[in-house]
Amino acid sequence: MARTSVSKSDLELIALQEIQHVPGGELVISVEIEHGDAGPDGLNWRLLVIAKEGADLDRLQNAATTTSHRLKRRYQLVIQSGNSAGG
């Protein structure tokens, strides 16, 4: 099965929406993708989940792990090279 190429910001939005559908996930306010050298396969990344106080951290950790595995099967992370900001 071919994976769809997706930008970091789009993948973060997809991950946030999926995690918020997990029981307890409504307390998640942000999802960030941390990547080293994503490499040609676009799989060297992990999700960082930021939640409001009172969230069940074990449940959210499990949701983040499950979601990242699922997304890695469906999507290939495309890292933009360079920075468009002048300097």
Image: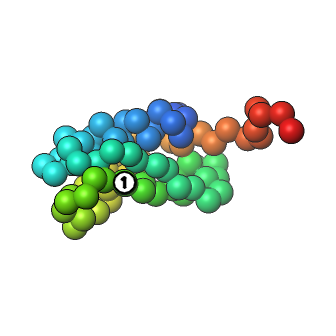
Q: Quadrant of the C terminus?
A: top right
Answer few, some or many: residues within 10 Å of disc 1's Cα (few below 14, many 20 plus, some between 14 and 19): some
Q: Position of residue 65 (x, y in %)?
A: 32, 59
Q: Is residue 59 visible?
A: no
Q: Is residue 68 visible?
A: yes
Extreme residue in the right direction:
87
On the image, which quarter does residue 84 sit in? top right
37, above or below 86, in the image: below
Q: In the drawing, does residue 74 fall left or right of residue 23?
A: right
Extreme residue in the left direction:
23
Q: Position of residue 58 (x, y in %)?
A: 22, 67
> Which residue is depicted at the point 64% across and 48% down?
40
56, above or below 75, in the image: below
Q: Return the residue at label 1.
A: 50
Q: Amino acid at mark 1?
A: Ile
Q: Position of residue 67 (x, y in %)?
A: 31, 50
Q: Position of residue 14 (x, y in %)?
A: 37, 36
Q: In the drawing, does residue 87 fall left or right of residue 82?
A: right
Q: Nearer the viewer, residue 85 or 40?
A: 85
* Scheme of image coloration: rainbow
Identify the element where label 1 is drawn. strand
> Which residue is depicted at the point 45% across and 38% down?
11
> Which residue is depicted at the point 55% across and 35% down?
7
